[in-house]
Image (spheres, rainbow, N blue to C red):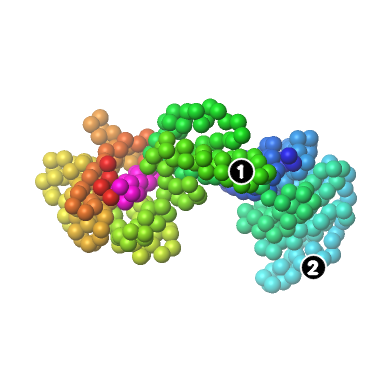
Amino acid sequence: MHKAYIISTGTELLLGSTVDTNSMFLAQKLTELGFKVMGKSIVGDNRDTMQAAFKTGLEMADLVVATGGLGPTRDDLTKEVVCELLGCELQIVEAELEAIKQFFARRKRKMSESNLKQAMFPPEARVLHNRLGTAPGMYLAKNGKIVVLLPGPPREMQDMYLSAVEPLLSQESGLKGAKQHTRIIKVFGPGESQVEDLLGEILDKQQDYGVALLAQEGELTIKLSVDNADGQKAEQRLDELCSRITAALGDNVIGSDEASLPQVVASLLSQKQLSLAAVESCTGGLLSKMITDLPGSSKYFWGSVVSYSNQAKQSLVGVKETTLQEYGAVSRETAAEMALGIKQLSGVDIAVSITGIAGPDGGSEEKPVGLVYIGLAYKDKVNVKEMRFVGDRIGIRTLAAKSALDMVRRSLLTEEGAK
């Protein structure tokens, strides 16, 4: 199998002020193309560390793909470092220089002399035109290796990779598509260790397939892969594995594709021609944001009420004052009245409520930070679920909103109300 190595450059990546999404994109795309990604490096704008990263990449792989460091400033060193290592001379490419000049002219801005370095390339390199910025990329095949340099901004990098690099790699490497066939299964509810226990033998006896688990914000992604040139056999094997995993995990499985939890809920509401409303306290409208981030959500989502204070709970959705006094705002009883109240107010088919303590303050021994009640009113039933989450304020709010959506999902699947 062809081997690849990925390098992300930029001191901002090391400082944590910028998230390295480029390497994630490239790893996925290179794997789909048929490359085996041997490793990744993140390095700052430092000549010595860049050299070390490229030396490692060239030793380990046939292909090294790097992002960043192609700009006009002094710390944009990627191209210079690569040319030093491979013994290449940089020369002005007139066509690229003219393209950069036109880029500035269209924006009625003066081009700095420092931008000249962006138009300099080895004669043996293929220059990759940047349709979205000023920094061209580079594709260089030398000494049996391929080095690809791409701009750092993700939008520019992705456009250049898809339009120029991937076709070149496919043509020159002979890889016409992924020999590794993959399938995604999304899970919500059990933790990673619980899923490992439930999948037991599937995880223990990986031979002609691979299983990777990725947990993020309450959702668990299971990625299945099968290395097989025979696509039909690989897909049959994946179908078998998906059936076994779905049987083991039951209704904890959201779906067998890339769809998110909000998208799955939206799809179910649309299919069943049902409407949803929400009333949120500790999540402050986060569930509503997750739903309305989806285009066309007005077809099934009535809207929401953020009843953050006790007064809002009373005046907007009809929670009784005696309920708040006796049980408190964070209680099973209040969550039930919130759900019934928003359902009556909106006239929807299904209503969900969230009330809890997101922290970092406000908790007690009886009602600690992370305690959340989620109410769901559907048909002639109202169900309330008590949840206890661990994490910071953002994490607790996110888990609460997703758990509420999951209650809606499960109720729509069973038609019996959330359990």
Q: Quadrant of the C terminus?
A: top left
Q: Which amino acid type corresponds to the residue marked 2 in the rendered image?
A: Glu
Indicate the position of residue 231 as horizontal and vertical percent values: 63, 47
Q: Secondary structure at mark 2?
A: helix
Residue position for label 2: 98
Indicate the position of residue 8 as horizontal and vertical percent values: 67, 44
Whether residue 92 sits left or right of residue 192 in the image: it is right
In this picture, is 44 found above or below 114?
above
Indicate the position of residue 309 as horizontal and vertical percent values: 23, 50
In this picture, is 397 found above or below 153?
above
Q: Quadrant of residue 198?
A: top left
Which numbered disc covers residue 233? Answer: 1
Whether residue 316 sits left or right of residue 266 in the image: it is left
In this picture, is 230 found above or below 288?
above
In this picture, is 7 found above or below 191?
below
Q: Which amino acid type corresponds to the residue marked 1 in the rendered image?
A: Lys
